[in-house]
Image (spheres, grey):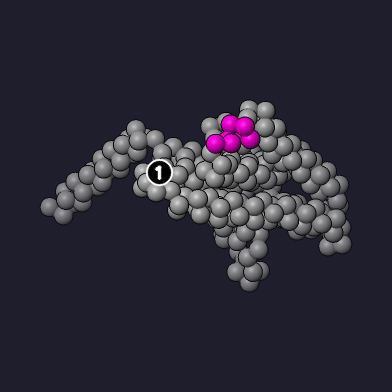
């Protein structure tokens, strides 16, 4: 599990550094421009890291399934070589996906200007700039990628159906609590990615707006990688105590400020 969490942390770091630094620089220097090559690099890295993260979340669901449903065979099935091969497959699939999308996208002619309605080079926003009859091939690649991610989601659901059936059959309450504490952070991340990403790309055109597009882009591209370490670290009791101490201190200071304001 910790080997896969290491890979997840590296992917999260890559996702954040792909979009946030350039957006912060544009904000500080009051500019909205990005060079063509930088835009292509952003597309490549983002389209590589996001699918790779979902593939890795699928592998982690399988890892949890083996650990909970077949614990006696765990070390035989999930040996170090298998884990490395699975992680390499997730990384390789993501970068192959990025090569196909980037090469195909940036070979198309622009017909609708060069202004993006987004804070980073997001693929759907770039497609709006191309000639209407030029990006059919890219739409096909997007459909193939979406189908593969849908297959991963179905696999995750089936894995957790088996996991919950096994967990509910555990006689001790402590054993059930340990199993749920291992699975729930993973489920939270899957739900966060699925809900924000799906709504961002499949929302009705009637409710589309620049502000909503920006908000959804932040929710699926920045929030999950940022909160992922915190979600998984909440299993650590020392971190829980530290977070509770900080929150209690902030709450106490807020009460003092309010009390002094009404005196």
Above or below, 211 relative to 79: below
Residue placed most toward the observer, 207 or 196: 196
Give left or right: position of 175 versus 209.
left
Give residue 96's position: percent from left, percent from top: 78, 40
Residue placed most toward the observer, 228 or 122: 228
Q: Principal SS element in the magenta part?
A: helix
Furthest toward the top, the residue is: 80
Give left or right: position of 56 versus 28.
right
Residue placed most toward the observer, 96 or 42: 96
Q: Which residues are magenta?
A: 72-78
Residue 153, visible in the rendered structure: no
What residue sits right under mark 1 in the picture?
A: 175
Give left or right: position of 49 versus 3.
right
| Residue 71 sits inside the magenta stretch | no
Quarter of the image where one finds residue 100: top right
Above or below, 245 relative to 105: above
Above or below, 43 relative to 83: below
Say which residue appears at 47% left-offset and 42% top-offset.
182
Quadrant in the picture for the N terminus: top right
Quarter of the image where one finds residue 206: bottom right
Say which residue appears at 21% left-offset and 49% top-offset.
255
């Amino acid at each position: 599990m910790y080997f896969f969490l290491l890979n997840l942390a590296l992917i999260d770091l890559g996702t954040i550094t792909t979009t946030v630094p350039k957006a912060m620089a544009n904000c500080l220097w009051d500019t909205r421009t990005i060079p063509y090559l930088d835009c292509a690099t952003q597309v490549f890295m983002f389209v590589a890291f996001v699918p790779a993260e979902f593939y890795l979340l699928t592998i982690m669901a399988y890892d949890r399934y083996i650990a909970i449903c077949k614990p006696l065979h765990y070390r035989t099935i999930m040996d170090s070589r298998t884990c490395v091969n699975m992680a390499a497959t997730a990384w390789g699939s993501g970068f192959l996906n990025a090569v196909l999308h980037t090469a195909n996208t940036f070979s198309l002619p622009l017909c609708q200007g060069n202004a993006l309605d987004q804070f980073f080079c997001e693929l759907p926003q770039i497609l709006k700039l191309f000639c209407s009859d030029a990006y059919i091939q890219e739409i096909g690649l997007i459909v193939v990628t979406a189908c593969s991610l849908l297959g991963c989601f179905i696999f995750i659901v089936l894995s957790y159906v088996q996991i919950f059936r096994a967990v509910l059959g555990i006689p001790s309450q402590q054993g059930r609590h340990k199993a749920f504490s291992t699975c729930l952070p993973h489920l939270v991340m899957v739900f966060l990615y699925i809900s924000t990403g799906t709504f961002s790309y499949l929302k009705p055109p009637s409710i589309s707006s620049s502000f909503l597009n920006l908000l959804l882009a932040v929710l699926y591209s920045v929030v999950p990688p940022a909160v992922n370490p915190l979600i998984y670290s909440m299993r650590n009791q020392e971190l829980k105590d530290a977070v509770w101490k900080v929150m209690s201190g902030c709450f106490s200071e807020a009460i003092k400020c309010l009390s002094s304001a009404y005196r």
